[in-house]
Image: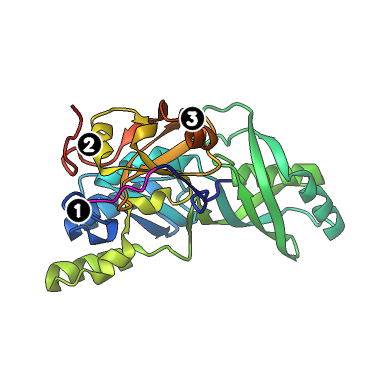
């Protein structure tokens, strides 16, 4: 599971940032805030994830809205929805771990001792066959079950909390648990309580979003909308970061790789091929890329490519061109 590695920094340069260029994420004009924002929707039972994203797009009058991780129509919970320019970070969030609370219903009585014994066997790496009705090719796949906690057993119902690798099918997990216990079983109810760095405590309903948007349109009060819609930077808080000089930003936005000379500080613990977020000194997300150099190498080297950017988030004209 991903962890926030940005608390410990390796410093390379004491550059300051110029207030003439860019802006702190929380100071963006409301329209820019929306276009570079994400909202954590508490998906209701009934609609598809695609339909929920379409409703968010309709409510906000956005050109496009993407979601990070499909939930079946009957499933509720955390559905991160990214708006316009922020959709560029969607692929980064799709691979993050998930947490679910779910009920497995056993078709026959099984002793609690056996239930607990079998559940322990499913913690770690398991092999799953995706269900018949799914969006991926049906073939055996390995998935990691980070934790599988029994919260309650009532008659033939077992209430779980699970932390799992992205792409784990809880419906299949219930069937496989039953088989191992020697009985049939199915998933009776499911709620996603966490998706990557986002939890259901941060989630809002579609009605909350619509009310906040209408309040802004009618009265000009932005406060509710700003509280509900988070800056795109909120979507990379869980990954390591590299902060760059103002003079480097425009070149990166035009496709240049990040070199050691452009860095002010970097999260410790970065290894080659890790995903990293490249940020300005104001905390704006420039883009997301792959580390070509470890933090330890950056500490001692004066030259070389540190990050190859894969997705540019920032607009090209927010910082001036300063290369020759």
Asked whether the residues under the numbered discs 2 and 1 touch, taking CB atoms below 8 Å apart as contact, a structural biologist would say no
36 or 171: nearer the viewer = 36
Q: Position of residue 217 (x, y in %)?
A: 14, 67
Q: Position of residue 1 (x, y in %)?
A: 59, 46
Residue underneath mark 3: 293
> Disc 3 or disc 1, which is closer to the eye?
3
62 or 241: nearer the viewer = 241
Q: Is residue 15 magenta?
A: yes
Residue at disc 2, secondary structure: helix
Secondary structure of the magenta portion, mostly? loop
The residue that appears at 79% across and 49% down in the rendered structure is 120
The residue that appears at 52% across and 30% down in the rendered structure is 272
Q: Is residue 173 magenta?
A: no
Q: Position of residue 39 (x, y in %)?
A: 34, 57
Q: Position of residue 291 (x, y in %)?
A: 46, 32
Could you tell me if residue 58 is visible in this image? no
Q: Residues within 10 Å of mark 2 (few under 14, many from 20)?
A: many
What is the CA distance from the residue labelled 3 to the residue labelled 2? 21 Å
- N-term mark: 3 or 1: 1
Residue underneath mark 1: 32
Q: Residues within 10 Å of mark 3 (few under 14, many from 20)?
A: many
Asked whether the residues under the numbered discs 3 and 1 touch, taking CB atoms below 8 Å apart as contact, a structural biologist would say no
Residue underneath mark 2: 250
79 or 228: nearer the viewer = 228
Q: Is residue 104 above or below residue 93?
A: below
Residue at disc 3, secondary structure: loop
Residue at disc 1, secondary structure: helix
Q: Which residues are magenta?
A: 13-18
* Way the structure is coloured: rainbow
In the rendered view, does 7 fall on the left or right side of 233?
A: right
Q: Is residue 116 above or below residue 224?
A: above
The residue that appears at 79% across and 44% down in the rendered structure is 121
């Amino acid at each position: 599971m991903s962890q926030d590695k940005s608390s410990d920094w390796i410093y390379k340069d004491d550059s300051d940032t110029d207030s003439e260029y860019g802006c702190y994420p929380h100071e963006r004009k409301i329209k820019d805030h929306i276009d570079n924002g994400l909202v954590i929707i508490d998906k209701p039972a009934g609609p598809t994830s695609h339909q929920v994203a379409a409703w968010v797009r309709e409510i906000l009058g956005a050109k496009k809205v993407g979601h990070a991780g499909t939930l079946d129509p009957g499933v509720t919970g955390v559905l991160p929805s990214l708006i316009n320019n922020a959709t560029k970070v969607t692929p980064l969030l799709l691979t993050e771990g998930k947490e679910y609370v779910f009920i497995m219903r056993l078709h026959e009585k099984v002793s609690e001792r056996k239930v607990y014994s079998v559940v322990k066997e499913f913690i770690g790496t398991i092999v799953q066959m995706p269900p018949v009705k799914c969006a991926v090719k049906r073939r055996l796949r390995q998935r990691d079950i980070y934790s599988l906690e029994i919260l309650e057993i009532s008659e033939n119902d077992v209430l779980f909390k699970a932390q799992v690798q992205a792409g784990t099918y809880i419906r299949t997990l219930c069937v496989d648990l039953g088989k191992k216990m020697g009985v049939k079983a199915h998933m009776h109810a499911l709620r996603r309580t966490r998706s990557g760095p986002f939890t259901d405590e941060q989630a809002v309903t579609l009605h909350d979003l619509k009310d906040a948007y209408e309040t802004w349109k009618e009265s000009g009060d932005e406060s509710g909308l700003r509280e509900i819609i988070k800056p795109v930077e909120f979507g990379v808080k869980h990954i390591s970061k590299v902060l760059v000089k103002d003079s480097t930003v425009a070149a990166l936005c035009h496709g240049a790789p990040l070199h050691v000379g452009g860095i002010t500080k970097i999260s410790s613990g970065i290894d080659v091929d890790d995903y990293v977020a490249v940020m300005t000194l104001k905390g704006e997300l420039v883009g997301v890329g792959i580390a070509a150099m470890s933090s330890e190498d950056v500490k001692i080297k004066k030259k070389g490519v540190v990050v190859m950017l894969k997705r540019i988030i920032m607009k090209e004209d927010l910082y001036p061109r300063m290369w020759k």
